[in-house]
Image (spheres, rainbow, N blue to C red):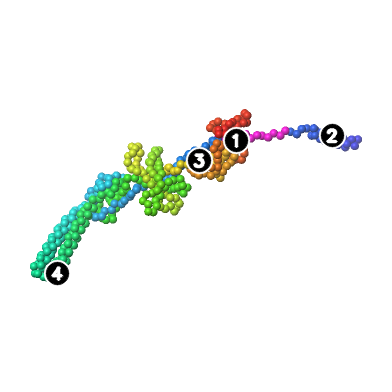
Amino acid sequence: MKWKKVLLPLLILLGALVISLLIMQSSENPERRTRKTPATTVDVTQLKKQNFQITIRTQGTVRPRTESTLIPEVSGRIIKTSKNFREGAFFEAGEELLQIEGSNYQIAVTVAEAQLAEAQLSFAEEKALADQALKNWQRLGKTTSPTALVLHKPQLALAKAGVASAKALLKQAQLNLKRTRVIAPYAGRVLEQPVDIGQYVSPGTVLAKIYAVDYAEIRLPLSNRQLEFVKIPESYRGETNSQSQSNEVTLTVNLGSQQHQWLGSIVRAEGTYDVRSRRLFVVAQVDNPYGQQDPKKPPLKVGQYVEAQIKGRRLDKVFVIPRSAVRENSQILLVDKQNKIQTRRIKAIWEDGQTMVISEGIEEGELLCLTPITFAAQGITVKPVLDGKPLFSNGTGKTSKRKGS
């Protein structure tokens, strides 16, 4: 009986093991199914060559063409000022801005006139004496020539010099009297006016700071990259006229919510680079910036900050793509005819904040992927959408016919 208790469980375990082996051998391997990752839908655009006008953006500050400091050449008290002798007021060339008291200078003119009359009388007397001395010498029958002293030549020269000196003194007195009236050297505007009626001034006193209003200038910094696409009027030694045509410039000023624009042109480049920024400053000129061209547009003001757009070169038959479509390391994503992503490195000949211009490395008719893909592996399948129309059919899995293919 004891052997039955031992043998029976062993037989049961052995039978279970045999049955399990038979079941495992007779069963079929399970079918493996792989989950298909759905293709990413991307927006694309078809590359086409076009002409591109380069616009260079920079900025600067308005400054006057000519700025002067008026300083008196005579001393005195200011007795009169023009109504335009005020800060911000306009004046015309030849206009009297202020007048200095001229009584002392008028007296000096009168005294100088009297001195001139006296000198002329002395000269006339000496001339008469010289003529009489010559006649007397001839009457005496002298055979030798008379000396200069006998003929009163030194006295006559002294009298003549006295006349010239008196004339110079009179001219100086008249000039000082004229200088009591301060005349505008050109049409301009008053920048600063530190003096007024009743103030005593002398040579060296600043009467006013003024600037010309015929046109304004704006210094605009350009990098070497930007200079490549701008025609700068260059000046050479020995040549009076600058070479190359100037570029048009549009100047924009933002006043609150309003925006105003002026048109100008690049007239010259400065002779040296700025050592701090390593940029070359070009000078834009705006004619008649203070005239009322539009009742709603205020005049330009000295020191005003402006944004400038310089019209540069025109690039012919190039590809213009949005900057957002360019990935790191200057790579773009193209979609081939099998709707697979292809990466390609490009080199731009021009770029700004919105666009990049490419002349080679891509072909006309290729599809540029505009949708940013974080992990875009070479050869992954996508669903391209061109102008809102899909180029991939979900039902058939076939691509529709593309333009230019």
Callout 2 amino acid: Gly
Would residue 113 be seen by someone viewing this image from the given angle?
A: yes
153 relative position to 226: left or right: left
Q: Secondary structure at mark 1?
A: loop
Residue 337: image tag: 1
Query: x, y (%) of residue 17?
Result: 82, 35
Position of the N terminus, as image quadrant, is top right
**Which residue is the site of mark 2?**
15
Sequence order check: which comes first, mark 4 or mark 1?
Answer: 4
Q: Earlier in the sequence, mark 2 or mark 1?
A: 2
Mark 3 or mark 2, which has the lower sequence index? 2
Q: CA distance from mark 4 to mark 1?
A: 122 Å
User: Which residue bears the numbered disc 4?
Assistant: 145
Mark 1–mark 3 distance (CA, rounded to whole Å): 23 Å
> Callout 3: few (<14), some (14-19), or many (20+) C-alpha neighbours within 10 Å?
some
Spatial separation of the CA atoms under disc 3 and disc 2 = 83 Å
Q: Position of residue 65 (x, y in %)?
A: 34, 48
Residue 303: in magenta span:
no
Find residue 318 and name its label.
3
Q: Quadrant of residue 176?
A: bottom left
Measured from the top left, where is residue 364 in percent x and y? 54, 38
Residue 212, labelled with which disc?
A: none
Q: Main secondary structure of the magenta part?
A: loop
Q: Who comes first in sequence, dot 4 or dot 2?
A: 2
Question: Pointer 1: residues within 10 angstroms few (<14), some, or many (20+)?
Answer: some
Nearer the viewer's eye, disc 3 or disc 2? 3
* Residue 370 percent across, percent down from the top left: 54, 37
